[in-house]
Image (cartoon, rainbow, N blue to C red):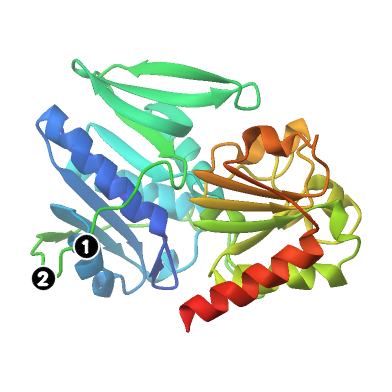
Amino acid sequence: MNSNILVFIEQREGKILPASFQLLALAGELAAKTGGQAEACLLGQNVSGLTPAVASYGAKKIYTVDNAELRYYRTQPYTTALAAVIGAADPRAVLIPTTALGRDLAGRLAARRQAALVIDCTELVVEGKDLVATTNVYAGKLGAKFKLSGDRLQVITIRSNAYSAAEPQAGASTPVQAVSVTLGPGDLRLKFKELLSTTSGIKDVTEADIIVAGGRALKSEANFKIIYELAGVLDGAVGASRAACDAGYQPHTRQVGLTGKTVTPRLYIACGIDGAIQHLAGMRGSKVIVAVNIKPDAPIFQVATYGCLCDLFTLVPLLTNEFMRMKG
């Protein structure tokens, strides 16, 4: 085992998840302190065209596994492929974005490699010779720290937007090593049949830098139109409170909160959301929080960076028009 940090680059149909670039920046910082280097792993079909982008964000070496069976994610073949890359790279730690795919893959990989596993970290630092990972517990009210011994492989998932990506360097030259993998019958028991998209072009809340979320005060699914319009202008995602989802205004795939999805965007705009405990637990890690609410005693104002005590039906369209004007 060397001191290198390997980053799993999550990509879908040739589009790399921004969180992967964030992890490359983190890997570079950690490797500089452990005496290693930041490396990357690309799995999929026809992924060679993605290597220049990965190199531009700081990967010092890129491992690729190109196989038609890896075009769409399935746990077993991806685990076998990533385990093969780990065998070739022999890294100290593997960093994986905390996504639905990442959570599934990390657990299986750690079991396969008998590695230490920490899920959904908000901070990862070097203390002495050890990596120390921090996760949130008790709905984000406390942080738990885990010191990871260097005597075994460490598999760590990192929450999106917990770190910022570095500025890409065009023309960066990085060696690429293709890793050969043989997928056996056990890897291919689950057959891919058809891919059905459940999205309408709007980003998922767990992957967005900007989220515009609506609550029960929107009063109907039709009224969420103003939330979608503002999110569209900002190139953001649409979120919703549990009350709004339970009322049928939005699907539960957009629910933010303890029983929904945990998000950490750069900007979170909460429109008509009072701020129940379970909702705050899912979004309190946002860098900047803007609350729009007519209730002066709404709990959301206790965590908001900026509070707007006004009617969302008046302010949200004004914000949309102003951002459209600014963007020309």
Q: Disc 1 vs disc 2: Cβ atoms closer than 8 Å?
A: no
Q: Count up the numbered dots.
A: 2
Q: CA distance from mark 1 to mark 2?
A: 9 Å
In this picture, is 294 found above or below 29? below
Residue 2 appears left or right of 220: left
Question: Which of the numbered marks, if any, corresponds to residue 239?
Answer: none
Q: In the image, 41: left or right of 45?
A: left
* 58 relative position to 273: left or right: left
The secondary element bearing badge 1 is classed as: loop
Rendered view: 221 above or below 258: below
Disc 1 crowd, CA 10 A, few/some/many (<14, 14-19, 20+): some
Residue found at x 77% / y 54% = 310
Q: How many residues crowd mark 2 within 10 Å: few (<14), some (14–19), many (20+)?
A: few
Camera-nearest label, 1 or 2: 1
Quadrant of the image for the N terminus?
Answer: top left
The residue identified by callout 2 is 171
- Percent of width and height locating residue 202: 62, 70
Of residues 321 and 147, which is closer to you in this image?
A: 321
Element type at mark 2: loop
Residue at screen point 64% across, 21% down: 138
As drawn, the label of residue 168 is 1
At which x and y percent is residue 100?
56, 49
For badge 2, the amino acid type reads Gly
Residue 43 visible in the current orientation: yes
The answer to which quarter of the image holds residue 91 is top left
Which residue shows up at 18% across the image and 45% down it?
38
